[in-house]
């Protein structure tokens, strides 16, 4: 069971971004390798086009030089902690999708600390493969989320500091105004823009059992309104709150409950 804490903590933010050398040292976490790391990283910043550390390149260099090993001889319990300041709805949506796309389909939340928008979230996963920092970097970057630092604090224990300051939500379906859209079986939550519509109508197949979970967000990804039902309701109608730009549509329990897809209408 995940432990949730609402506590009065001071989350220390680093005043300056760390260097590629410092990040590499944090990932390797072996002082005997520092001289080799200095040769590899001292004269190169390894920044991407946005000025953030290009962790995909850094990870590639470390793997090429056998300084980190991501394949384990047997499955182990990996512990991953993610720290950031963000809206919880967007944080969990973007991070969960990234972990699933990275191959961690089944992970167990074990601790959650929330305070004044700061999030400290820990999950455990049983795997024979350590999460590749470069893979996570590329997946998070799709939503303009960046990794500021990574620390290897134990043999199978990693801590990630994330930057959600410029996070954006990528839509995965396009729905025209006043035109019925027939959506296929979802692999992830449906995300679409409201197109300045005033009313949202959604129908599930009568052969499915939909327990609606619908989130309305503004242009800055702040949650305006959420509707969650623990009762089957295959026919959903709701006026769209003022200021809504994005809608996330899912199921309270499992996307398998809407395996036949949904029919969505945005009315002006």
Image: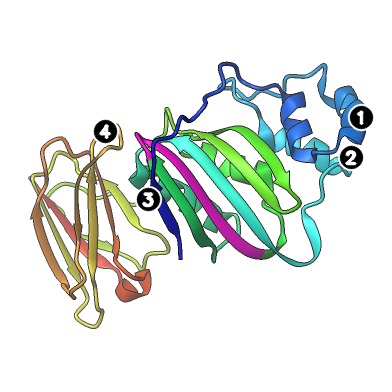
CA distance for labels 4 and 2:
43 Å
Label 1–label 2 contact, CB within 8 A: yes
Identify the disc placed on residue 65: 2
Give the secondary structure at mark 3. Answer: loop
Give the secondary structure at mark 1. Answer: helix
Q: Is residue 57 left or right of residue 208?
A: right
Label whose residue precedes the other's in the sequence (1 or 3): 1
Q: Is any atom of residue 199 visible in this view?
A: yes
Q: Which residues are magenta?
A: 115-126
Q: Is residue 210 left or right of residue 199?
A: right
Residue farthest bottom in this picture? 207
Where's the C terminus, which quadrant? Answer: top left
Mark 2 or 3: the one toward you:
2
CA distance for labels 4 and 1:
46 Å
Above or below for 94 versus 161: below
CA distance for labels 1 and 2:
9 Å
Q: Is any atom of residue 170 visible in this view?
A: no
Report the residue at 40% width, 49% height from top: 5
Identify the disc placed on residue 172: 3
Identify the disc placed on residue 36: 1
Q: What secondary structure do most residues of the magenta stretch adopt?
A: strand
To which residue does mark 4 refer? 219
Label whose residue precedes the other's in the sequence (2 or 3): 2
Give the secondary structure at mark 2. Answer: loop
Above or below for 6 versus 105: above
């Amino acid at each position: 069971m995940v432990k949730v804490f609402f506590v009065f903590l001071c989350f220390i933010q680093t005043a300056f971004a760390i260097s590629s050398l410092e990040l590499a040292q944090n990932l390797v976490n072996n002082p005997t390798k520092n001289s080799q790391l200095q040769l590899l990283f001292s004269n190169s910043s390894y920044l991407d086009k946005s000025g953030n550390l290009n962790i995909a390149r850094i990870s590639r260099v470390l793997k090429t030089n056998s300084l980190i090993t991501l394949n384990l001889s047997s499955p182990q319990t990996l512990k991953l902690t993610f720290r950031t300041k963000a809206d919880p709805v967007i944080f969990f949506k973007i991070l969960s999708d990234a972990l699933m796309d990275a191959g961690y389909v089944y992970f167990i939340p074990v601790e959650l600390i929330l305070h004044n928008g700061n999030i400290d979230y820990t999950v455990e996963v049983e795997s024979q493969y350590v999460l590749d920092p470069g893979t996570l970097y590329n997946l998070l970057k799709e939503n303009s989320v960046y990794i500021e630092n990574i620390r290897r604090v134990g043999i199978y224990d990693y801590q990630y500091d994330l930057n959600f300051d410029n996070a954006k939500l990528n839509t995965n379906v396009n729905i025209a105004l006043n035109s019925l859209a027939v959506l296929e079986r979802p692999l992830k939550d449906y995300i679409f823009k409201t197109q300045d519509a005033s009313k949202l109508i959604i129908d599930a197949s009568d052969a499915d059992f939909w327990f609606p979970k619908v989130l309305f967000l503004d242009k800055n990804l702040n949650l305006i309104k959420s509707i969650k039902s623990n009762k089957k309701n295959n026919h959903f109608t709701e006026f769209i709150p003022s200021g809504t730009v994005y809608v996330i549509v899912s199921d309270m329990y499992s996307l398998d409950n809407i395996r036949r897809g949904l029919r969505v209408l945005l009315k002006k």
